Image (cartoon, rainbow, N blue to C red):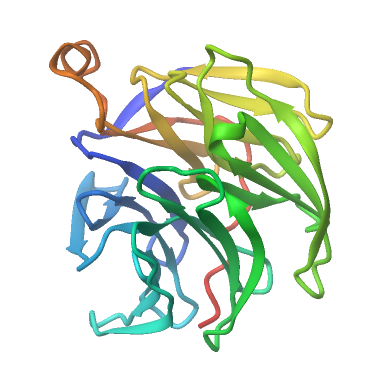
């Protein structure tokens, strides 16, 4: 599968690509630079906004603006840039990381400690009224989260485990149960990071330190590998007018000068045109 440069950047920790169908733009974040980016593939242009804290994820809101998973909790930016906290829960040494929105418009917000200590991270369901419902309280690096096309399965990554796990999910209540292993990434192939599920129910997962994005069938069988010209791909998402282009974010953090010279596209946003058929992202209902 041919991979191309979508937008040249030098993001420290590019993450969380999300297609905004209303604006026809890709939203992504540079966590450690505390920046939210918008990329317009029609013009090739980009805009950005600084946040006052490290930002793990940014997702569109139904009424305009974005919801952000910050160091100290979840906040809302209105379309005019006005900010307010939705759920504030500061914990020293911890920050927000990846997040996802389910079919009901609820945000699933993950956290992690800066030192990546086991058990220091969490996963919460944050409702539009700001109520935070605990889901997991004993993770290290809460990462990729997405659902099967019918909403009855939820896929989830705690990166140091090297697993993609799957839960049974109740689309009506939002509850998940019966966690089990969906796929395991072997030693030497990197660590699973952000993921997305396509319209066929296949799971695409970016491999940190693996220079690749993998696709697994709904039965957990590896059936496709996209080689990435950067050692630290972080996440992937479908976008474009027909949701057929796979966008991939990457990182430069932790790479020395030699590695950066060998990976000139590290930190950029990459794209695989016509990679498959994605599913529309649901905006946050708050």
Report the front residue among 124 and 11. 124
How many numbered badges does the structure rendering display?
0
**What percent of the width, then of the height, locates residue 210?**
47, 19
Residue occupying image coordinates x 39% and y 67%: 91
Residue occupying image coordinates x 49% and y 37%: 245
**What percent of the width, then of the height, locates residue 1?**
52, 17
Give the quadrant of residue 84.
bottom left
Instruction: Give the left or right position of residue 55, taking residue 152 as reference.
Output: left
Instruction: Give the left or right position of residue 206, taking residue 57 as reference.
Output: right
Report the front residue among 65 and 91. 91
Instruction: Give the left or right position of residue 6, taking residue 193 as reference.
Output: left
Above/below status of 141 relative to 163:
below
Instruction: Give the left or right position of residue 143, taking residue 137 as reference.
Output: left
**What percent of the width, then of the height, locates residue 217?**
76, 29
Q: Spot the residue most to the bottom.
A: 129
Give the quadrant of residue 249.
top left
Report the front residue among 89 and 167. 89
Above/below status of 172 relative to 96:
below
Residue occupying image coordinates x 36% and y 70%: 72
Q: Does residue 247 appear in the picture of this structure?
A: no
Residue occupying image coordinates x 59% and y 60%: 123
**What percent of the width, then of the height, locates residue 178?**
86, 51
Above/below status of 161 relative to 85:
above
Q: Does residue 89 appear in the picture of this structure?
A: yes
């Amino acid at each position: 599968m041919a991979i191309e440069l979508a937008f040249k950047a030098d993001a420290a920790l590019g993450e969380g690509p999300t297609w905004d169908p209303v604006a026809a733009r890709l939203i992504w974040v540079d966590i450690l630079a505390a920046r939210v980016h918008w990329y317009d593939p029609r013009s090739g242009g980009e805009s950005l906004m600084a946040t006052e804290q490290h930002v793990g994820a940014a997702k569109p809101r139904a009424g305009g603006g974005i919801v952000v998973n910050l160091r100290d909790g979840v906040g809302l930016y209105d379309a005019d840039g006005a900010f307010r906290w939705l759920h504030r829960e500061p914990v020293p040494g911890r920050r927000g990381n990846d997040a996802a929105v389910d079919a009901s418009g609820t945000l699933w917000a993950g956290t992690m400690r800066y030192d990546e200590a086991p058990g220091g991270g969490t996963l919460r369901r944050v409702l539009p009224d700001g109520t935070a419902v605990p889901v997991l309280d004993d993770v290290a690096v809460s990462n990729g989260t997405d659902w099967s096309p019918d909403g009855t399965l939820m896929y989830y990554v705690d990166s140091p485990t090297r697993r993609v796990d799957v839960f049974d999910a109740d689309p009506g209540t939002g509850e998940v149960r019966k966690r089990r292993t969906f796929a395991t990434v072997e030693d030497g192939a990197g660590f699973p990071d952000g993921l997305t599920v396509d319209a066929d129910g296949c799971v695409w997962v970016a491999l940190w330190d693996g220079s690749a994005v993998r696709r697994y069938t709904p039965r957990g069988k590896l059936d496709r590998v996209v080689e990435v010209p950067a050692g630290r791909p972080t996440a992937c998402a479908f976008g474009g007018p027909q949701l057929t282009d796979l966008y991939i974010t990457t990182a430069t953090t932790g790479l020395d000068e030699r590695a950066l010279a060998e990976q000139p596209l590290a930190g950029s946003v990459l794209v695989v045109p016509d990679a498959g058929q994605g599913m529309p992202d649901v905006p946050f209902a708050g």
